Image: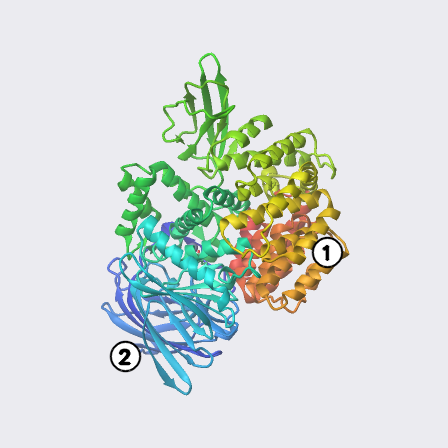
Amino acid sequence: MRTETPPTIRLEEYRPSDHLIDSVDLDVRLAPRETRITAVFALRPNPAGEPGAPLVLDGDDLTLLALDLDGQTLPPDAYAASSFGLTLHRPPQRPFTLRIETQVDPTANTKLMGLYRSNGVYCTQCEADGFRRITYFLDRPDVMSVYTTRIEADRGEAPVLLGNGNPIETGEAGHGRHYAVWHDPHPKPAYLFALVGGRLDTVATRFTTMEGRAVEVAVSVEPGKGSRAGYALDAVIRSMRWDEAVFGRAYDLDVFNVVAVSDFNMGAMENKGLNIFNDKYVLASPETATDQDYANIETIIAHEYFHNWSGNRVTCRDWFQLCLKEGLTVFRDQEFSSDMRSRAVHRIGEVRTLRARQFPEDAGPLAHPVRPRAYAEINNFYTATVYEKGAEIVRMLRTLLGEAAFRTGMDRYYADNDGRAATVEDFLDAFARASGRDLTAFAQWYERPGTPRIAVEGRYDAAERTYALNFRQSLPGGGPPLVIPCALGLVGSSGTLAGAVCPQVRDGVFVLETASAAITFAEVPEAPVPSLFRGFSAPVRTEMSLSDAERLALLRHDADPFNRWQSAQSIGMRILVERAGARAPESDDAGPAAQDFAGALAAFLDTEALADPAFAALVLGLPGEGDVANEIGAEIDPDAIHRARQTLRRHLGRALASRLSGLRGDLADVPGAPFSPDAAAAGRRALRNAALDLIAAADPVVGADLARAQLDGATNMTDRLAALGVLSLIPGEAREAALAAFGERYADEPLVLDKWFAIQAAIPEEDTLERIARLRQHPAFSMTNPNRVRALIGSFGLTNPTQFARTDGAGFALLAETVEMLDRSNPQIAAKLLTTFGSWRMLEPARSSKAGEILARIRAIPGLSRDVADIAARTFAG
Ligand code: B3K
Ligand code: ZN
């Protein structure tokens, strides 16, 4: 591990590479401990670079075995090599060939970056800078090359050999070894390189593109798990079809491979023609996967596939432009999932994620613009801001330009930048030209951190029949105003007031471009309730003092489902914030506002629950404890928030009890009916289980009985896990017995055990720390598997606020110990875990001072990785 302070890399210091590599020929001879890589590069000086500059190749933990230039061995004074780089002091000023032989140890590679082994399967992860752990290279996304890869391995150990592009040759290599050669005709940056070698089961099918290309589509998984790969395979086909229909983008190779491995740092990776996945996002069966798992698989399969155009065909000039591929591709996967499922329900889910993950990031010490301007460690910038807020920017662009101009702009972006490494400016330029609009002011969204606040006031003039709205925007850091599309409408006593007109509102959208603005609606027959930011048309916080009665009117009548849900959330939030702020004790009675709220929910359930169960389940779901903490924003007391939420859940559970059990009956599965993971069936399960949760909150005895019965009779993991989750919150023998039985039943199913670890880590009780200590000794737990660590330790930090932020500091200490331990083997995962401290300064003083002490202790650990040192420094400083 290197100890010197790494330099900060800055956007304004971008310079093109002094050299280019047109082609890369690799010969990779796989072996568990000594894999040898022979790389032949066709190099030339970059006309846009500095003439005569040295050639500085990146490396990371490499052993150099041999080096020659145009077939000639280089004299020792011509170059300098270490395991972290290779420099040719005076490279030729003409095209030349460099041949480099390196050796790596895939078995010892616990960072899971570069070439490593997962359960015996050789695989690679190169984004952002893992290729330099395979060979020396110009490891930057604006150096694009055509790759040919020969992969050789022991046939018994690795009968399946996969690479980027198309397969062109296979054969015997002697001594029980064989090889495959893959050629990828599309120039690409090194971060998209991949190979796989191992024993794998494959399911496959064919897809013919709209251009008539027959594509072999395959999903490969660890042996014995092929029966769980079908849903992912189908999701690939639906993604291919959708990208053709909606964006006019066809696949461009003869094969498309997805491979699932069990040790993976993130969700998946879009390597050209060879997407490699965390198996959590591929494997699914009714017995092992929840509805959420199915939905995640569908989304992530689509996301990685869509990168083939938004990321691979058009890639990023440098890592500051990461949102160019990630924000855009998240937007594309969100649209896909919305088309596959319920658009309204999906949008609510997107916004919940944004608020739970991105808003706190944007309000804390790790806040950064969607396009950051500086970084010390790029792997720490694969954030909710770059991904989720990045997607919101693309969505706003579509709202501003309209569907047609947006699509024209996308086409232009692809046409102008195909095969290039592009920038955010290139992206916006395509839309500006397609629409004739000046997007200079809009571009500020990429540059400014922090969530804008929009304060709104409304005034009705009965005599004039007008309604005036005043908007005022403010950004945490100050600065010029942003361009903010606000989709809106006015709602009257029986629905949207369609006759109300306002010249500044076009197609239902008002664009706020100045620090403040006033607009007036005419022909308003009655005092309306404004429905603002319909569909969450901008990633902002809205401040408007509506009464509960007005919010309930929106819940009843608004044409916009998002705002119907939002109004229920806002009422719940107000009650929770008030009780938590007053440090109120837990109680059976949550007060008069909660009574009205329950009454409105009862009416809502009576009229709508069966028509759209998925939506009803969302309306019933109160804001989470983290959401309430974010709303309070200072001097947070997680225990007070927990008590407030318990009180309101109990109150609603009691008030709605008979309806909730009625719904559970109405929504019961037909006995013997086959399982379907589709949105309609999942929606019924969601409402049934939301009802169970509230019933149990109101009456733990009844709840425990129902949950036990559901656990025993469940025919799918969604129902089983929901029941276990309910039981896990009711202390006693029954809980312990249920947990033990579940653990035994799924002892050989690591992905199911992850759910079991996570449920236990979330128990809001004093002895959860001891429980976690016990679970760390469980035979299935492993510190080297990122999914296990995230399930047990990560989810403790993210989903158990009362125990993570304990006043004695023991919860923080558990995270810190894990970070310290993991930093030695897998710094990326360690750094990610450490980000759970992001909101520490918002805690009440007793807790924040403990968190501060522990952060200071982490910072002082000698030899910290760059990943962890960077997060620790920024978290502490902010
Ligand atoms: N592009 C990858 C993420 C790589 C993360 C590197 N630390 C997956 C994705 O966003 O599709
Ligand atoms: Zn992505």
Q: x, y (%) of residue 809?
A: 69, 52
In screen coordinates, is 409 left or right of 460? left
Q: Which mark is residue 71?
A: 2
Q: CA distance from mark 1 to mark 2?
A: 70 Å
Residue placed farthest to the right in the image?
733
The image's mark for residue 65 is none
- Residues 12 and 787: in front is 787
Quarter residue 402 falls in: top left
Helix, strand or loop at mark 2 = loop
Corner quadrant of residue 844 = top right
Residue on which the image places disc 1: 735
Foreground of the two, 79 or 297 = 297
Q: Earlier in the sequence, mark 1 or mark 2?
A: 2
Q: Amino acid at mark 1?
A: Arg
Choose mark 1 or mark 2, whichever is in front.
1
Q: Is residue 452 above or below residue 381?
A: above
Image position, residue 116 (x, y; %)? 48, 71
Total residue callouts: 2
Q: Residues within 10 Å of mark 1 (few under 14, many from 20)?
A: some
Using the rendered image of the protein, determine whether residue 863 is visible from the camera's viewpoint.
Answer: no
Most extreme residue toward the left is 94
Rendering coords of residue 111 (x, y %): 51, 66
